[in-house]
Amino acid sequence: MIGKRKRTKKGEGDGDGGEEPNPSPSSPTTSDKKKHFLPSMIKNKEKRSEVHAKLKRQKRFEKRKMLKARDASEKKALELGEEPPPKKVPRTIENTREFDETVCKLDDEELFAEIEADEFSSILKREQVPKVLITTSRFHSTRGPAFIKELLEVIPNAHYYKRGTYDLKQITKYAKKMDFTCIIVVHTNRREPDALLVTALPDGPTAHFKLLNLVLRKDIKNHGNPTGHWPELVLNNFTTRLGYRVGRLIQSLFPQDPNFRGRRVVTFHNQRDFIFFRHHRYVFDTKENKLGVSKTNKAKDLNGDKSGKEKVIAHLQECGPRFTLKLRSLQRGTFNTKGGEYEWVHKPEMDTSRRRFFL
């Protein structure tokens, strides 16, 4: 009979070829402990901060090493005449957005047919010059008139009328009679402008925007003063059908014949359904490129010859105001709270995903 094999004690099987017992899967190994080790597990504050700084330095060093290796591989590929390795695209909320069927394509003939026959086509084809009426809600604040004053300087051919006790339907009727193409109502709450109501005339649509982060010109550091020239308009990231419609509504506020000599730029930038408004002007400065100092250059300077060439540098100077818009609803026709039909309304259940956008 074959007897039972005796168990060797720990350390006895080194010379006899005995195998060490495998650790149980439940017991953590030293490598696992190192992986799951965090500086926050250290109770001593000085030791914890020291370990955290060390890990941060190590991470920075590894990142620098990786960038150097990537630059070296690109340089080597260019020297050999090969294509450099493709750069990695970082994952952002914008490029990982949820799929949307309403995103417009350049070859969409149906979209262009709708655009040519919409309410804004006469203005955008330069058949009509926009004329904008700006008014307030019935109870406006102290910052409201200052904001309206700056809006009048931003939008050409805009006129301000006091609201008084008139109803919005009466104002719309008067604006149609006086050939206005758009009405902007600045709504205020708690002495602060908090909403914009934009109605295209004569047949709508009406957009209701929430107004956020308003900064007036006087609060902007090193601001510039705009001229009376018609500005250049820039619209960014309006990609869906709803975004195209809102973008064309905004576009219909401005004349389509900008005066580039005025160097004015008005930007509406859509990012994650927030529309950021900025108003800038181009500024051109001239600077001299000084060459290396030498005896010959010093002699030329003494004789009156310039040793450097003039270089033109362009930069932007903000004119203000600065604010952010968030679309709340888009209504067909002019403003009507009772019997109006809505093309789009924002609801709380639409905000369940951070990667879902509508403009």
Image: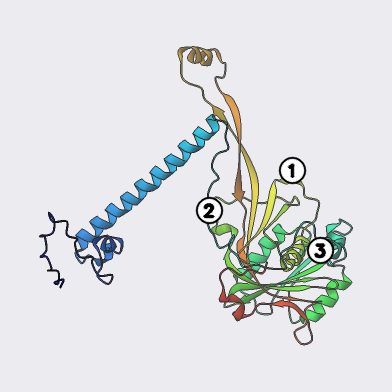
Residue neighbourhood size for the residue with mark 3, other residues' Cα within 10 Å, grouped as few (<14), some (14–19), many (≥20): some
Question: Which percent across, then down, holds residue 240?
Answer: 71, 65
Frontmost residue, 25 versus 123: 25
Q: Give the SS element for disc 1.
A: helix
Residue neighbourhood size for the residue with mark 1, other residues' Cα within 10 Å, grouped as few (<14), some (14–19), many (≥20): few
Of tags 3 and 1, which is closer to the observer? 3
Relative placement, left or right, of 145 versus 304 is: right
Q: Give the SS element for disc 2.
A: loop
- The amino acid pointed to by label 1 is Arg
Task: Read off the residue under disc 1.
Answer: 261
Query: Looking at the image, which residue sits at the far bottom?
Result: 338
Of tags 2 and 3, which is closer to the observer? 3
For marks 2 and 3, give the CA distance.
Answer: 43 Å
Frontmost residue, 217 versus 89: 89
Question: Which percent across, then down, holds residue 33?
Answer: 26, 63
Q: Do the residues labelled 2 and 3 touch (CB within 8 Å)?
A: no
At a point 57% along the width and 16% down the height, the residue shown is 305
Frontmost residue, 89 versus 116: 89
- The amino acid pointed to by label 2 is Lys
Task: Read off the residue under disc 2.
Answer: 221
For marks 1 and 2, give the CA distance.
Answer: 24 Å
Where, by quadrant of the figure, is residue 93 drawn?
bottom right
Q: Looking at the picture, does residue 216 appear above or below residue 340? A: above
At a point 48% along the width and 15% down the height, the residue shown is 298
Q: Are marks 3 and 1 in contact (CB under 8 Å)?
A: no
Task: Read off the residue under disc 3.
Answer: 111
